[in-house]
């Protein structure tokens, strides 16, 4: 590939890809071909779950101790040394758990994957909650990190990502393809801790993670995903889950993100470029999520007025939080507080300085594109496999409804691939600085002693953001 042909591939990304070095691109890209094709970690994330849980069709309460070293009857725990292997590869995982009455929350995350001596760190996490509503409806909610979406605001004047009408890019972590040999990526589990009565926190910390910039348009998606056209270095990602239960039985589960600035950038894995040359004022960043809902009866509504929301087919501004209602009586089971205010922090100063304490985030529903599904396709079989086993171990009702975890997987798998519900939080003021903002999830449970109603099963799988540049918690 010549310099001219490479530019032609990226022609409508000229704002971001405004400098391409003059080199023999094919010679560079074909070097260490196996490493450059970073899909190797995708392969192992698809096969590793086979070794994670017992393969028996049945699953009885208490069997979880053989996998996690703990039971679901304990109040809280963390096991950061769960070892699995497949052929010449192996991995360690961390699982954290909190259980209060009929409410439980859990996190399953990869620490690292080792393939023939090559270490791979991927910030994959599955966070879940299991509880019963005041009307005795059983609910499962899962949150899986997906991606951030950067865009250059050139269309619509709305500060929102109109993918297909303006340049946009995914930010994809690629910790096994590090063009900075002096910098070593790391991972550190944050164990479950009881902060006070009915107040808990656990999470994961990642440091020095490279992330690939991938074109969101379908024609260039595969090229920029496979080849290291542009890679950036993220100083830190800390993702914590703060869980508190109030006297009314509401569970507030806050996802606390700490994600540092882009400390370096590299063209084609060898040519350094200053991040400030790439990040211009017209660029915005959006945290993109999706919901997969498996139930016979549910509605998605606006939280304040209860009006039903239609599934989006394009970018649709949203001026309210989202509520999920379940059953024939439309009982409110789950709210997604998308957040409004955020701060901008400059990591480049010593000490760090706050550039702005009060910026306003924009909430939007997004029409899903083929590249969105392709980017998270590797997560689907892994996530449904893990979640089905957790659900089967936690719920007597699930065990009564399905023959075993394999049966639940067969019924739940489709929803991971075909969600119509994609939503995002856009930060219109960015400039490559650190963003601090905490989205809040509220679960309506029966922990206050309310009861009644018949049995009902709802499995909600909310796939959240893999924050690789900016979505961060307040310091």
Image (spheres, grey):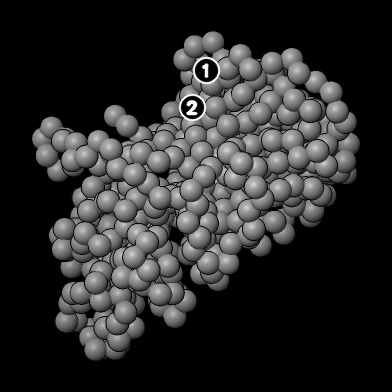
Q: Give how far apart the Cα atoms at labels 1 and 2 are.
A: 7 Å
**Quarter of the image where the C terminus is located:** top left
Q: Which residue is mark 1?
A: 199
- Number of numbered callouts drawn: 2
The residue that mark 2 highlights is 242
Give left or right: position of 461 versus 314. Answer: right
Q: Earlier in the sequence, mark 1 or mark 2?
A: 1
168 horizontally vs 93: left or right: left
- Residue at 53 percent across and 42 percent down: it is 321
Q: Quadrant of residue 347?
A: top left
Mark 2 lies on a secondary structure that is strand
Against 8, residue 422 (above or below) is above
Q: Position of residue 251 (x, y in %)?
A: 59, 25
* Image location of residue 10, percent across then percent down: 31, 79
> Does the residue at mark 1 contact the one at mark 2 (Cβ under 8 Å)?
yes
Q: Quadrant of residue 211?
A: bottom left
Visible in this render: residue 214?
no
Residue 154 showing in the rendered view: yes
Residue shown at 43% from the left, 69% from the top: 163
Q: Residue at x 47, y 15 (%)?
A: 195
């Amino acid at each position: 590939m010549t310099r001219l042909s490479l530019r032609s591939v990226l022609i409508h990304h000229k704002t971001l890809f405004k400098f391409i070095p003059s080199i023999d691109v094919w010679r560079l890209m074909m070097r260490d071909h196996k490493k450059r094709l970073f899909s190797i970690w995708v392969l192992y994330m698809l096969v590793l779950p086979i070794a994670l849980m017992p393969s028996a069709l049945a699953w009885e309460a208490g069997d979880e101790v053989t996998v996690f070293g703990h039971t679901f009857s304990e109040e809280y725990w963390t096991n950061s040394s769960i070892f699995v292997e497949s052929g010449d590869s192996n991995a360690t995982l961390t699982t954290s758990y909190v259980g209060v009455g009929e409410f439980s929350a859990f996190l399953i995350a990869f620490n690292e994957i080792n393939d023939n001596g090559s270490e791979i760190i991927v910030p994959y996490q599955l966070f879940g909650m299991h509880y019963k509503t005041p009307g005795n409806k059983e609910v499962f909610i899962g949150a899986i990190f997906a991606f951030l979406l950067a865009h250059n605001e050139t269309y619509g004047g709305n500060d929102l990502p109109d993918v297909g009408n303006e340049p946009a890019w995914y930010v994809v972590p690629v910790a096994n393809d590090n063009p900075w040999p002096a910098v070593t990526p790391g991972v550190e589990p944050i164990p479950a801790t009881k902060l006070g009565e009915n107040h808990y926190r656990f999470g994961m910390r990642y440091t020095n993670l490279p992330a690939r910039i991938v074109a969101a348009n379908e024609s260039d998606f595969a090229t920029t995903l496979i080849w290291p056209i542009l890679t950036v270095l993220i100083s830190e990602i800390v993702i914590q889950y703060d869980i508190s239960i109030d006297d009314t039985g509401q569970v507030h589960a806050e996802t606390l993100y700490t994600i540092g600035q882009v400390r370096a950038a590299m063209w084609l894995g060898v040519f350094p470029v200053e991040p400030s040359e790439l990040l211009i004022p017209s660029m915005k960043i959006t945290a993109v999520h999706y919901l997969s809902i498996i139930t016979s009866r549910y509605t998605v509504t606006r939280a304040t007025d209860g009006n039903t929301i239609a599934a989006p087919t394009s970018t649709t501004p949203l001026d309210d939080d989202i509520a999920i209602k379940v059953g024939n009586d439309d009982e409110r089971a789950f709210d997604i507080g998308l957040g409004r205010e955020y701060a901008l922090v400059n990591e480049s100063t010593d000490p760090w300085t706050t550039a702005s304490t009060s910026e306003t985030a924009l909430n939007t529903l997004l029409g899903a594109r083929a590249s969105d599904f392709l980017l998270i396709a590797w997560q689907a079989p892994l996530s449904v496999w893990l979640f089905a086993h957790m659900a089967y171990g936690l719920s007597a009702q699930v065990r009564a409804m399905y023959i075993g975890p394999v049966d639940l997987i067969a019924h739940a798998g489709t929803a991971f691939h075909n969600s119509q519900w994609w939503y995002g939080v856009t930060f219109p003021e960015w400039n490559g600085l650190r963003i601090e903002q905490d989205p809040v999830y509220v679960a309506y449970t029966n922990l206050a002693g309310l009861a009644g109603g018949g049995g009902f099963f709802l499995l909600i799988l909310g796939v959240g953001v893999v924050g690789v540049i900016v979505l961060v918690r307040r310091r």
